[in-house]
Image: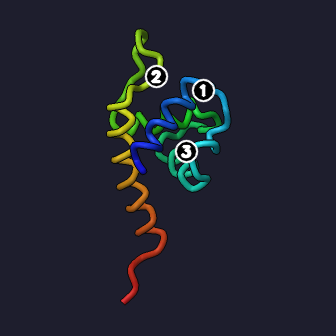
C-alpha cells in the first residue's frame, strides 16, 4: 500500500507537478501539511516539498525533486504526525 502510494506520487510529480494536490492527498492531509509548513499546498509540487520538509529536505539545484528514499522517509514521518493529530483531535475515552 505504501509502496504503491510512493510510486504513484513520484510518477505524478514528475509527470505534472502543477496538478492539484488533491489528486494524491486527502483534504485532511493537505490541511495538516499546510499547518506544518506554513505555506500553501495547492499544487502537487508544493505538497510534496512540504512533505519532504518534514525530514529537513532542502531542494538542491542539481536534483529538482526529492527522491524515492527521501519521500519514503517523509511519508513514514507524516504517518506518525497524522496519528498524533488524530489523537489530539479525538482524545481517548475511558
Q: Mark 2 near mark 1, Cβ–Cβ under 8 Å?
A: yes
Mark 2 or 1, nearer chain start: 1
Of labels 1 and 3, the one closer to you: 1
Q: Quadrant of the C terminus?
A: bottom left
Which residue bears the numbered disc 1? 17
Label 1: state its secondary structure: loop
Residue at the (64%, 44%) spot, across then down: 22
> Residue 89 vs residue 43: left or right?
left
Residue that carries the numbered disc 2 in the rendered image: 65
Within 10 angstroms of label 2, few (less than 14), some, or many (20 or more) residues? many
Image location (x, y in percent) of residue 18: 65, 27
Name the spot of residue 75 as percent of width and height, x first.
39, 44
Quadrant in the picture for residue 39? top right
Question: Which residue bears the numbered disc 3?
Answer: 34
For the point 33% across and 37% down, the residue is 55
Q: CA distance from mark 3 to mark 2?
A: 19 Å
Mark 1 / mark 3, whichever is N-terminal:
1
- Find residue 61 and report its horizontal and vertical position in percent: 43, 10
Gap between marks 1 and 3, in whole Å?
Answer: 17 Å
Outermost residue, bottom direction? 94
The residue sitting at 41% across, 26% down in the picture is: 66
Q: Which mark is residue 29?
A: none
Amino acid at each position: 500500500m505504501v509502496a504503491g502510494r510512493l510510486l504513484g506520487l513520484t510518477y505524478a510529480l514528475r509527470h505534472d507537478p502543477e496538478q492539484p494536490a488533491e489528486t494524491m492527498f486527502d483534504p485532511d492531509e493537505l490541511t495538516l501539511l499546510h499547518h506544518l509548513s506554513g505555506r500553501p499546498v495547492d499544487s502537487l509540487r508544493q505538497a510534496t516539498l512540504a512533505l519532504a520538509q518534514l525530514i529537513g529536505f532542502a531542494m538542491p539545484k542539481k536534483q529538482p525533486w526529492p527522491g524515492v528514499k527521501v519521500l519514503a522517509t517523509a511519508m513514514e514521518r507524516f504517518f506518525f504526525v497524522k496519528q498524533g493529530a488524530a489523537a489530539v483531535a479525538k482524545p481517548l475515552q475511558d
